[in-house]
Amino acid sequence: MKKNIKNQPFLKRVTFAVSGIRKAFKRERSFQIQWFCVILLLVFCLIVRPSAMWCALFAVVSALVLALEMLNTALESVLDKLHPEEHHEIGFAKDCLAGAVLLSSLGALIVFVLFLVARFF
């Protein structure tokens, strides 16, 4: 069933987006782990109470990691459907997608470590 989201009412488009997040959460273990890390970060922020600037930075890097993981999931799904057998270029594309998620995760970790250094050392 084709979902045409163009020119749909805003709330209808939001339901499509939320559905995508739910489906990615159900299918992808790494997405679940990343959400768990975001929740831990939220709890950490509620306890430690960093400045609004740090909270904003945490929110942005967390959203970036989650968004890139969703792009990785979506593109890998399409690639697997269009070309189910192994192929060098498909493997390259998937490795690049995974690399993008890894780089954003490392960036988020660096932000967190910098906060800890600035706050506690």
Image (cartoon, helix red, strand yellow):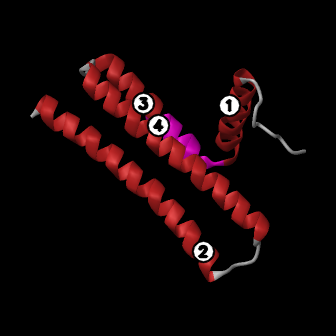
Image spot of residue 6 (x, y percent): 75, 37
Residue 41: x %, y % from top left: 38, 30
Q: Secondary structure at mark 3?
A: helix
**Circles 3 and 4: CB atoms closer than 8 Å:** no
Looking at numbered disc 1 in the image, what kind of residue is underneath it? Val
Q: Residue at x 69, y 41 (%)?
A: 26
In the image, 57: left or right of 96? left
Q: Which residues are magenta?
A: 28-37
Q: From the viewer's perspective, is the residue at label 3 or at label 1 nearer?
A: 1
| Cα distance between the residues tagged 3 and 1 | 21 Å
Of 96 and 37, the residue lying toward us: 96
Q: Residue at x 35, y 52 (%)?
A: 106
Element marked by disc 4: helix
Look at the image and say whether residue 30 sits in the magenta stretch. Answer: yes
Please name the predominant secondary structure of the magenta segment in the image. Answer: helix
Residue with the mark numbered 2: 91
The amino acid marked with disc number 4 is Ala
Where residue 40 is drawn, which disc sits there?
A: 3
Q: Decide which of tag 3 and tag 4 comes sooner along the chain.
A: 3
In this rendering, the answer to whether 120 lies above or below 11 is below
Mark 3 / mark 1, whichever is N-terminal: 1
- Numbered disc in front, either 2 or 3: 2
Label 2 close to label 3 by CB (< 8 Å)? no
Between marks 3 and 4 in the image, the one whose residue lies nearer the viewer? 4
- Which residue, given by chain and number where applicable, does mark 1 sit on? 18
**How many numbered marks are there?**
4
Q: CA distance from mark 4 to mark 2?
A: 26 Å
Residue that numbered label 4 is attached to? 63
Name which residue type carries label 2: Gly
Label 2 CA crowd tier, 10 Å (few <14, some 14–19, many 20+) = few
Lower sequence index among marks 1 and 4: 1
